[in-house]
Image (spheres, grey):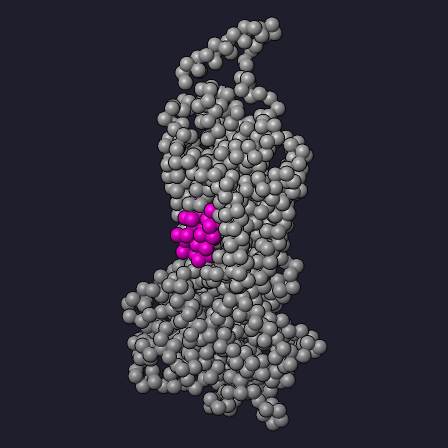
């Protein structure tokens, strides 16, 4: 598995939230097939005032030229031969120095596109008069308002168009990081603050943070768990063995992701540290049993054998149950959740295999524990605490119920206040550069998240007709009513730009031609100008290929603010009927798509699927318990202490104001899958004690609490602090995940130690039936079928040597007694 880790790739794209069969995903793919991939635009913003000087214009153009030529790569041709050709990751750069004008070619009766500045790139400073004349002409072109400068003319944008084929492949290299470094160096040199935004910048910044954090969290998980293990056992050998186990588990985890060709995303990056946190309890249960058995009789082989039989079987079941909980993600239709479920479930079972093989193997090779290594089994404060729990369960159950009802009321009232939301960058801290720069762009230009409206007229040339242009203009006027949208761009804007030139360039003539004489005179000029537009790569990128090949489909492109999913849904609901009144659905096929829409639907879909997976996990684990314990009433009681923490956490989120989103709803699945393990351990021991104590329910409950209480507390402490380390993340969602899972597991430990035994004692006459005594699986009760105290590994025992072997056994027992 370790050999596969170098093949592990990072996920740079936003996607995978929607199934391919979803209508939103189908619409988005259809749009990309016609017009190409959107969202490959990086924005660099600046205040305009310091650039409105000869020095500022030259410096701004030099930055644009440096970016345009900065990352030329060598690539092979499609025939696969060794014939490299130059390829650039940057298609073009558009800024105010690269702005073009549309002018009349009276000789050929057509429009031509020419730069406002005569020679590019600029080699020297212009004069003050030339600079004033340039900005005067730029501001006389309304086409650029909202694209190159804002309405107040206080800010400007430079737009970097990335090559979509290369940028969305592994050959992207470090182009975004290089552009960022170049812009930052320019900013420092000229003393002008720049704001960077756009999906390429946001994607790379977030992915790099994920890459940086995964190593940090794996290291933090090792450190936290190693420290806790040392504090529990005071034995560096136990700590070292446990760290070897979880290290192998992390290698398997990363290797399996690469083997399955899954990419490392914000969600899957949680799995390796999650494996450490989940794997350590396996080590605690196994080592505790090994030490306990060895302390009783001093026989190392017998202690290891009992560790495997008694705790190994129970650990198999609890690991299987946890894996089953995560495996429910596989049944969702979200690729992100499927990948998370597959990798987590497989590696939880892999962690069990590693634990049950490596720990006995290493313990066999290592010397037996000394008396000081088993002192942790006799810690008085721990047993005092457990005895205090026993006292509460026996004598103060009413207080347990009153406290439970109070917490339940708190949870329900908080649950009613929960909200669902999700932003593309909402997991980043408020002071992160991605957030602050995005807010700068949104405040001055409306937004930077792609939003597209595709209009299918169903008729060749129907999208280019004058009637369609009028409707598109009305649509753009509707979009301008919403502050969440930036200035939209469409074929109607290009037509207005050309008509302004037709009317000799006066700003007031930036409009569509009127029917009649204007349209008749203007039409031939426009038709003769198509080749001129195609000859300009910058013009093509800015106008965004407005039509399909038949001119029956057109697009309206707009950038929008990164609003939450609730606000986005309300916005869509409000705008849809207004659009339908302009483009009646009976005559036009209109869809709203783009990254913003896909993310909205994907987030909503993912939250719904996570909710379904939680319900499915509860049902599957309940069925598993029913097969184990053959008692429906016992299953109902067993679910209470595990559902209670989930309600408490949901209520806590409602009261604190933490919204439901993919990163926080994941809390419930993780916490339920882990916390149910304690319940299974407790009930398994409870059933064993029922058999031993002759069906004395009260005594069986108390003994089960005493026996499992210490291990449950050990593992809960490890899990609590293990997940709490996620609170150190720079991603808000990951921080919430760590805090909320820790809280949930803390409450789950309390309910399993107090509420579960209280309910068992309260309903002892009606709850535990005789069918509970014989489980569907005997996996947990093997020690009750055979007197394991009488077992010992026998090598080469010949027939007829029974008496001789009996004497050897008696001598060995006498020796063990004298040593103790």
* Residue depicted at x 47% and y 72%: 447
Total labels drawn: 0
Residue 31 in the image: above or below residue 332: below
Q: Position of residue 485 (x, y in %)?
A: 50, 75
Q: Position of residue 613 (x, y in %)?
A: 60, 51
Q: Is 446 in front, or is 71?
A: 446
Range of residues picked out in magenta: 722-746
User: Would you say residue 105 is visible in this rendering?
Assistant: no
Residue 46 in the image: above or below residue 403: below
Residue 774 in the image: above or below residue 617: above
Q: Is 376 in front, or is 150?
A: 376
* Residue depicted at x 64% and y 47%: 619
Q: Position of residue 663 (x, y in %)?
A: 50, 56
The quadrant in which residue 697 appears is top right
User: Would you say residue 34 is visible in this rendering?
Assistant: yes
* Residue depicted at x 41% and y 22%: 367
Q: Is 750 in front, or is 588?
A: 750
Left or right of 436, for residue 600:
right
Magenta region's main secondary structure?
helix
Left or right of 515, for residue 100:
left
Q: Position of residue 601 (x, y in %)?
A: 58, 63
| Quarter of the rendering occupied by the C terminus | top left
Residue 389 magenta: no
């Amino acid at each position: 598995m370790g050999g596969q880790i170098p093949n592990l790739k990072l996920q740079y794209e936003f996607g995978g939230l929607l199934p391919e069969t979803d209508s939103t995903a189908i619409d988005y793919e259809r749009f990309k097939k016609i017009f190409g991939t959107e969202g490959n635009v990086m924005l660099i913003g600046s205040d305009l005032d310091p650039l409105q000087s000869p020095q500022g214009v030259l410096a701004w153009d030099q930055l644009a030229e440096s970016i345009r030529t900065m990352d030329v790569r060598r690539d092979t041709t499609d025939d696969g031969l060794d014939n490299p050709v130059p390829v650039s990751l940057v298609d073009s750069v558009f800024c105010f120095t690269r702005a073009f004008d549309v002018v009349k070619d009276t000789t050929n009766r057509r429009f031509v596109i020419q730069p406002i500045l005569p020679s590019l790139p600029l080699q020297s400073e212009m004069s003050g008069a030339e600079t004033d004349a340039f900005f005067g002409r730029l501001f006389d072109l309304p086409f650029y308002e909202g694209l190159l400068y804002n309405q107040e003319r206080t800010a400007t944008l430079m737009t970097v168009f990335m090559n979509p084929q290369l940028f969305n492949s592994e050959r992207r290299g470090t182009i975004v990081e290089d552009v960022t470094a170049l812009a930052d160096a320019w900013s420092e040199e000229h003393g002008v603050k720049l704001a960077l935004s756009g999906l390429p910048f946001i994607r790379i910044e977030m992915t790099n943070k994920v890459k940086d954090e995964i190593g940090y969290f794996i290291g933090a998980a090792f450190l936290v768990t190693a420290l806790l293990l040392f504090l529990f056992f005071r034995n560096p050998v136990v700590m070292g063995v446990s760290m070897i186990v979880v290290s192998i588990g992390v290698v398997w985890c990363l290797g399996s992701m690469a083997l399955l060709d899954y990419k490392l995303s914000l969600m899957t990056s949680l799995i390796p540290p999650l494996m450490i946190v989940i794997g350590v309890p396996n080590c605690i249960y196994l080592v505790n049993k090994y030490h306990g058995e060895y302390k009783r009789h001093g026989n190392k082989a017998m202690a290891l054998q009992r560790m495997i039989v008694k705790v190994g079987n129970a650990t198999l079941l609890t690991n299987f149950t946890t894996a089953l909980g995560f495996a429910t993600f596989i049944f969702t239709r979200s690729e992100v959740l499927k990948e998370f479920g597959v990798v987590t479930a497989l590696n939880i079972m892999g962690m069990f295999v590693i634990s049950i093989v490596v720990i006995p193997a290493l313990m066999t090779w290592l010397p037996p524990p000394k008396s000081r290594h088993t002192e942790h089994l006799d810690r008085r404060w721990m047993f005092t605490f457990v005895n205090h729990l026993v006292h509460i369960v026996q004598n103060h159950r009413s207080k347990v119920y009153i406290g439970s009802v109070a917490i339940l009321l708190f949870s329900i009232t908080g649950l009613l206040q929960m909200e669902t939301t999700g932003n593309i960058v909402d997991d980043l801290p408020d002071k992160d550069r991605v957030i602050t720069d995005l807010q700068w762009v949104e405040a001055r230009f409306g937004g930077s998240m792609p939003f597209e409206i595709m209009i299918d007229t169903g008729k060749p040339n129907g999208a280019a007709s004058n009637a369609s242009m009028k409707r598109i203009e009305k649509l753009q006027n509707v979009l301008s009513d919403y502050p969440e949208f930036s200035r939209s761009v469409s074929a109607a804007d290009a037509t207005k730009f050309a008509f302004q030139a037709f009317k000799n360039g006066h700003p007031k003539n930036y409009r569509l031609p009127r029917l009649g004489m204007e349209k008749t005179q203007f039409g031939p000029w426009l038709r003769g100008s198509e080749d001129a537009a195609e000859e300009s790569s910058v013009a093509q990128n800015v106008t965004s290929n407005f039509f399909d090949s038949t001119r029956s489909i057109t697009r309206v492109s707009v950038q929008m603010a990164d609003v939450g999913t609730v606000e986005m849904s309300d916005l869509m609901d409000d705008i849809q009927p207004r659009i339908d009144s302009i483009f009646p659905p009976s005559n036009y096929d209109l869809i709203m798509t783009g990254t913003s829409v896909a993310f909205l639907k994907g987030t909503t879909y993912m939250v719904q699927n996570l909710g379904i997976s939680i319900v499915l996990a509860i049902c599957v684990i309940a069925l598993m318990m029913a097969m184990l314990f053959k008692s429906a009433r016992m299953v109902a009681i067993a679910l209470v202490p595990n559902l209670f923490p989930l309600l408490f956490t949901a209520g806590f989120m409602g009261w604190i104001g933490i919204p439901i989103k993919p990163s926080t709803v994941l809390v419930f699945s993780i916490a339920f899958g882990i916390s149910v393990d304690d319940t299974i351990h407790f009930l398994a021991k409870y059933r064993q004690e029922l058999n031993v104590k002759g069906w004395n329910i009260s005594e069986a409950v108390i003994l089960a609490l005493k026996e499992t209480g210490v291990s449950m507390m050990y593992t809960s402490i490890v899990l609590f602090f293990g997940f709490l380390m996620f609170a150190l993340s720079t991603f808000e969602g990951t921080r919430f995940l760590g805090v909320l899972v820790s809280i949930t597991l803390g409450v789950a430990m309390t309910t399993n130690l107090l509420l579960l035994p209280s309910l068992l004692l309260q309903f002892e006459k009606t709850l535990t039936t005789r069918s509970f005594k014989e489980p569907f699986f005997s996996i947990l009760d093997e020690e009750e079928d055979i007197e394991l105290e009488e077992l010992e590994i026998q090598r080469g025992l010949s027939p007829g040597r029974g008496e001789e072997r009996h004497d050897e056994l008696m001598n060995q027992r006498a020796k063990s007694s004298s040593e103790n």
